[in-house]
Image (cartoon, rainbow, N blue to C red):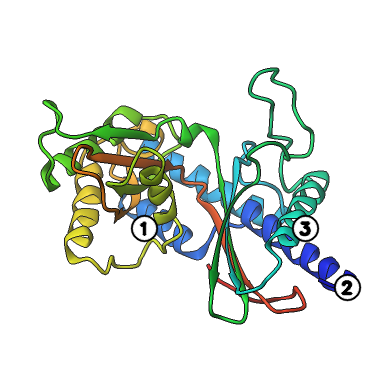
Amino acid sequence: MSTSTTTALQASLVELIRVSSTVLPRDVITAVDAGRKVEEVGTNAAYALDVIDCNIGLAKTKSQPLCQDTGSILVYVHTPVGYDQIEFEETFIEAVKEATTKGYLRQNSVDSITGKNSGNNVGPGTPDFHFHQWRKDHVEVKLMLKGGGCENVGVTYTLPNPKFGGRDLKGVENAILDCVLQAQGHGCGPGILGVGIGGDRVSGMAWGKHQLLRLLDDTNPDPVLAELEKSIVAKANQSGIGPMGFGGKTTLLGCKVGKLNRVPASFFVSISYMCWAFRRQGVNLAADGSITRWIY
C-alpha cells in the first residue's frame, strides 16, 4: 500500500471503531423498541428498557462508548486475492491505538498473568483477526466489540445430557434455554444468542459468534434452524426473566443458529451470549482505503 492509502485506511478504520462503539445498529434499535412496546408501563422491565433507550441516544449524541466495557475487539475481514493482509493488520492495530487515545475504546486489555493494562488495547490475541479471501474487488470489514459481562455467561454443552436430552433438536433447544436460564440477570439482558451446533470446542464457539454478524431480522436459510431460532426466542420471552433479570417479556432480542459438521464421538452446542449493547458494524472499503458502504 502507498503511504496515502495507509493513511486513508487508518482514518476509515478509526471511524469504523468509533461508530461501532457509540452507535447501535438499526436492527438492534428496532428490536429494543419492540421490547419497550410489549412491557407494561411502570414495571421494572419497562424502566430498564427506557434507561437502555436513553443510553443509546446519549452515546450517539456525545460519540461516547455505549458501555464502559468496550469489550474484546473481534475483526472479520474479506479481502481480494493478493491483498496485503499483514499491512491491513498493522494498520488496524494503529487504528485501535488511535481510537483508544480518542476515547472511543476504553483501556481494556490486560495481561492475563500480571494483570497489567497495556494502555492501548493491543496485546497477544487482541485485536482478534479473522481473515478470508474472496474474488470480489473490495475489502469488507466487520467489527464486533463484545463485552466481558456477556462473554462470561456463554457456554458449551455436550450432548447427550441426562438433563437436556439426546443428540437431536430437542436436546439442542433445551441446552440453549438452559443457557438463558443460568444467565438470568447476568450478561446485561435482553440478550442475543449466537449458537454453533457441532464442530469442536473451538470451531463451534467461533461459528456461534459468527452468527452474531447476521441481521436480527433476517431468516435462516435452513428452515429447520429458522424454526429453532423462533422457538428459542418465543420460549425465552415467556420465561419471565426479562431485561436485566427484573422480570418481564423481553429476555431475548434474537437467536441466530448455525451448524458445522462434527466427528461422531462429539456433539457440542456452543452458545455465545451478547448483551443488549450489541456493538457490531461493518464497512466496504475501496482500493484507496476509503469507506464506500456501511453494512449495518
Measured along the vertical axis of the image, is residue 84 above or below residue 114? below
Which amino acid does the dot numbered 3 rest on? Answer: Thr
Q: How many marks?
A: 3
Measured along the vertical axis of the image, is residue 180 above or below residue 217? above
Measured along the vertical axis of the image, is residue 238 above or below residue 244? below
Question: Disc number at residue 4?
Answer: 2
Residue pointed to by mark 3: 91
Q: Earlier in the sequence, mark 1 or mark 2?
A: 2
Measured along the vertical axis of the image, is residue 83 above or below residue 234? below
Count residues near mark 1 (Cα–Cα under 10 Å), then give few for <14, some for 14-19, many for 20+: few
Asked if one can make out residue 190 in the rendered structure from this viewpoint, the answer is no
- Identify the residue at horizontal 69%, vertical 20% (top origin): 115
**144 or 26, which lies in front?**
144
Residue pointed to by mark 1: 34
Q: Are marks 2 and 3 in contact (CB under 8 Å)?
A: no
Question: Is residue 101 toward the left or the right of residue 267 in the image?
Answer: right
Count residues near mark 2 (Cα–Cα under 10 Å), then give few for <14, some for 14-19, many for 20+: few
Gap in angstroms between the C-alphas marked 1 and 2: 44 Å
Mark 2 residue element: helix
Quarter of the image for residue 155 reads top left
Q: Nearer the viewer, mark 3 or mark 1?
A: 3
Picture coordinates of residue 275, whole percent (x, y)? 46, 42
Mark 3 residue element: helix
Which amino acid does the dot numbered 1 rest on? Answer: Ala
